[in-house]
Image (tube, rainbow, N blue to C red):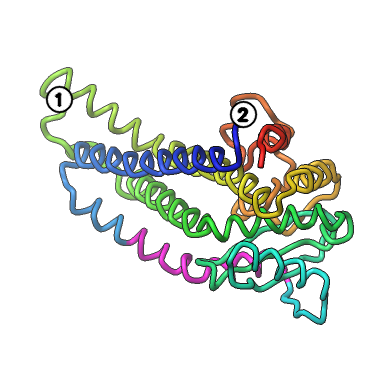
């Protein structure tokens, strides 16, 4: 039977495997563009522009997300019980106390953001505080602190940047720079060259889709890891299990969430977990709740 430690190690390995896939995807895209246009200078410039625009997102992504979510900063006197709960878990985890925000929405949900543990933020909805018991709330906070401790926020930022690099490069060439005629003078010099040329064009078109699928796969693996580490932190997996059951069954919408922020929440705010066919799973930001609960029940302390 798997333990919390072996589950965490397995998910870490899988995450880095997917991250390596990202770098391979970018290299293949670079090769495809180089072959079609026979010019690597444009590719280099496009990557530099993409990284430059992503730099701003890295430093200010937490403020942007909090503003989009209409989250309000609270102090200890505003909710002493919540603050004590977070403080106790932070002491156990050896983490600095993050800033705490409240989202005034009825759907129970939560997320963590920030570029590192010293600049971390935890945001919880009003519905989470109203509908969960203390041990269930501890399970949720433990999950979010695990994201902070595991540096998931940094990893997710890197993945978002890599996805942006792929999408921006492909979009630039497909929208404004794709002039196939005359771009490769020797492309008609044989059937093999023609096949490679057509394959390169197809790969440039599909590269943004591949990047998105890799980003979602990494997001799902980090949720499994945070579940396992959160249960290890609280020493009570049933608390998180009960919280996930309540969160996933709540019918209220979360209008402040959108496609850019859905992956941050502990549970998909659009309730996308209900679609469990293998094809739909590819496009889900979170693993199905039943799979997460099954993994937690199969673990032992």
Q: In the picture, which quadrant includes the C terminus?
A: top right
Asked if residue 2 lies left or right of residue 297, the reply is left
In the picture, which quadrant includes the N terminus? top right
The one of 72 and 17 positioned closer to us in this rendering? 17
Q: Main secondary structure of the magenta part?
A: helix
Q: Label 2: state its secondary structure.
A: loop
Q: Quadrant of residue 69?
A: bottom right
Labels 2 and 1 touching (C-beta < 8 A): no
Local SS, label 1: loop
Closest to the observer: 37 or 79? 79
Q: How many marks?
A: 2
Judge from the rendering whether residue 275 lies leftward or rightward of residue 104; answer left or right.
left
**Residue at point 81%, 66% (across, down):** 104
Q: Position of residue 203 (x, y in %)?
A: 34, 33
Closer mark to the observer between disc 2 and disc 1: 2
- Residue behind mark 1: 188
As drawn, the residue found furthest toward the front would be: 301
Q: Give above or below for 150 relative to 186.
A: below
Q: Which residues are magenta?
A: 49-71
- At 28% from the left edge and 38% from the top edge, which residue is drawn? 28
Residue 148, compared with residue 205, is above or below; it is below
Is residue 165 inside the magenta stretch? no
The residue pinned by badge 2 equals: 1
Question: Residue 228 placed where, x, y %?
Answer: 63, 44
């Amino acid at each position: 039977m798997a333990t919390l430690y072996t589950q965490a190690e397995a998910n870490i390995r899988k995450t880095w495997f997917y991250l390596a896939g990202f770098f391979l995807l970018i290299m293949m895209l670079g090769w495809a563009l180089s072959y079609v246009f026979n010019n690597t200078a444009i590719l280099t410039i496009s990557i530099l522009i993409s990284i430059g625009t992503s730099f701003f997102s890295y430093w200010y992504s937490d403020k942007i997300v909090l503003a989009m979510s209409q989250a309000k900063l609270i102090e200890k006197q505003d909710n002493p019980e919540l603050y004590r709960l977070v403080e106790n878990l932070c002491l156990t985890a050896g983490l600095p106390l993050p800033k705490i925000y409240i989202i005034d929405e009825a759907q129970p949900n939560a997320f963590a953001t920030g570029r590192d543990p010293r600049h971390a933020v935890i945001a919880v909805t009003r519905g989470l505080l109203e509908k969960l018991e203390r041990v269930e709330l501890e399970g949720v906070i433990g999950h979010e602190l695990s994201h902070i401790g595991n540096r998931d926020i940094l990893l997710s930022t890197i993945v978002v940047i890599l996805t942006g690099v792929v999408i921006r490069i492909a979009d630039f060439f497909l929208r404004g720079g794709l002039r196939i005629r005359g771009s490769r003078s020797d492309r008609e010099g044989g059937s093999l060259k023609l096949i490679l040329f057509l394959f390169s064009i197809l790969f440039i078109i599909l590269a943004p889709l591949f990047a998105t699928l890799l980003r979602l796969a990494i997001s799902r693996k980090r949720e499994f890891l945070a579940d396992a580490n959160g249960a290890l932190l609280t020493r009570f997996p049933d608390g998180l299990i009960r919280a996930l059951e309540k969160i996933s069954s709540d019918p209220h919408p979360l209008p402040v969430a959108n496609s850019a922020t859905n992956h941050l929440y502990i549970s998909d705010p659009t309730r996308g977990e209900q679609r469990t066919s293998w094809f739909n799973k590819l496009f889900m930001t979170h693993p199905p709740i039943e799979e997460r609960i099954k993994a937690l029940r199969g673990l032992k302390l």
